[in-house]
Amino acid sequence: MSGQYGYAGSILRVDLSARKITTVPTIDYADRFLGGRGIAAKIYWDEVAPEVKALEPENRLIFMTGPLAGVSPGVGAVRWLVCGKSPVTTPEQFSYCNLGGSWGTELKYAGYDGVVVHGKSDKPVYIFIEDGKVEIRDASILCGRNTLETREMLKKKLGGRVRVVAIGLAGEHLSAIATILADNDASGSSGFAAVMGSKNLKAIAVKGSGRVANAGREKLIELNRQFREMRKTSPEQSIWGAGVTPAKKKLDICRGCNLGCERLVYENKAGRKGKFICGQVNFYTGRAARYYGEQDWQEVPFDAAMLANDYGIDVFAIGPMLTWLSRCHRAGVLTDENTGIPLSKMGSLEFMEILLNKISLREGFGDVLADGITRAAGLVGQGTETFITDYLSKGEQATAYDPRYFITTGLLCAMEPRMPIQQLHEISRLFIGWFQWAGKSGRPYLSTDVCRVVAKRFWGTELAFDLSTYEGKALTAVNIQNREYVKECLILCDWAWPILTVEFSDDHIGDPSLESKILSATVGKEIDEAGLSRIGERVVNLQRALTAREAGGSDTIADFHFTMPQKNDFLNPSGSAPGKDGEIIDREGAMLDRKKFEEMKREFYQLRGWDATSGLQTRAKLEDLNLKDIADVLEQRGLVV
Ligand code: SF4
């Protein structure tokens, strides 16, 4: 126990080159950066020089929890994240991924708020952490095995209670689209499995029997009650996997959360169990349905997702890859013969087995695909570069919550190294509720009037909910970023937070102050909504400094958003949208206006206190946010005004 409420007290540091294990006090970082993304970004800022490549030993892989994990039960606060330089970003830069399950809580119970791994082992190893004891152990026997087998072997050796985060063959072979996989099939993207592979680190196994104290048990019980009351909804069917799921399913609850959400575990007829949700459901369902037609195909999407998990490959990168491969195949550039992959059988399980296997082993054409389709298109040439220019967004993922419709999401994406999915969810969730109201389906309480009040309360302006104009979008983006960065520091679950709306209340307006109340009760230090938002702003600025140092940047998004009309959005096929004064307008076929987008960006820079023309941060703003040390470093590089 650290004596500091909310935190385990130490961050573990493992130098694999020197085989040296040390710790630093979490408090060294927590005062200014709170936890999670904030602390990880500061460690990275201090330790990873901009010139370091993602797969070089000097890159850091930082596993972080937040001050609520395992301490404030039942409020969706048990998630953890991984940060470091990502091999899948262009250019390579600081990035992040966020995972659920039980590994993060276990780490805190083992005595650590985070683990910073650097260096490179001269042979394959895994790290074993048990109640303050840490060992670097030989992993030769685990090499060449996929994630699930690795997990099972370590559980057998170390005891079933051990929690494991591991890489599969894709990570071992340094694929930039490789994912790490932890217990409860929690997976993390940004190519960090390749970073683990580059360090010869196969897994981190954790076992903890300690506890971390909170400062206000009674208060937390009351806040938990309020939180659950606000989250109550009418019974609804899961939106995931309707009609395609294997026979059995049950809720999968992350350790210490108890909320229950859309996170489900499925079991197929063969008895194979696994998490099946969101992109895992979507990435192969349509193709399997088309390929198998009348045949029994319902388990194929599940089996394909389980294969991707096992190899440790990002399904969000495979989805766009299938589009590119299909177009190359139709154009006659890629064939079954010249790739050794049965492209003509796309949609079948056989195709997916061969594709994932070849990518993971970098075998034949799999080597061309292993770092994603941007690189693959460059290698293949013959015009295939144009087959990705109408849908591919950042980090090898397809565009989502399309900026052509939402406008604000364009700004949010432009400022980040990868698709900032939590930020996109914050705004799109309110609109999705409104689609149901406007279409007279689902939960009908999110009327235009309610949504406008919610927009004003959470994002500072009703114009956030008016898609007829670019006005108000910069302010909306600033407020969403601040809140979502706080969420990533605490680390609160995206399924549950923020509480924007309440179904069973008179005004249906959610509570943006709940996060600060829960934090205050946990750590025993009063912090209000504005104070928490300021921490979010500080971490936004820290990450902005990282981006400036590593990527320079024009803060833009893929060109097609400005040149090609959006069509048939699956969330809102009608294209209807809220306009001025509650009028319903049609945004089907919308595109972003480049001039207005640039004006919106300048307004965003101004609201952030940055230079309105260049987007460079200002010393005044950084010092105001208690980031003088960051300003000093930026100044040496001419990156602050
Ligand atoms: S709400 Fe769901 S995904 Fe989020 S922490 Fe709880 S159980 Fe996990």
Image (cartoon, helix red, strand yellow):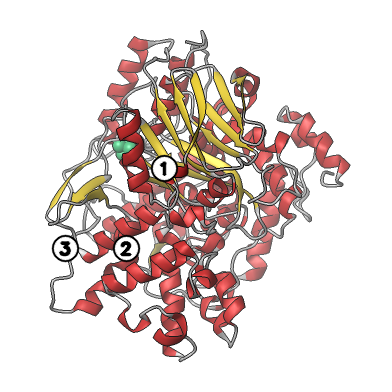
- Locate ligand 1 by image quadrant: top left
Q: Secondary structure at mark 3?
A: loop
Compute the Cα span from label 3 to label 1: 34 Å
Quarter of the figure with residue 596: bottom right
Residue ID for mark 2? 282
Q: Position of residue 510 (x, y in %)?
A: 37, 35
Compute the Cα span from label 2 to label 3: 12 Å
Mark 3 or mark 1: which comes first in sequence?
3
Q: Is residue 521 visible?
A: yes
Position of 617 with respect to 582 (left or right) is right
Residue ID for mark 1? 454
Residue ID for mark 3? 243
Position of 141 with respect to 25 (left or right) is left
Position of 569 with respect to 614 (left or right) is left
Q: Position of residue 328 (x, y in %)?
A: 47, 84
Q: Secondary structure at mark 2?
A: helix
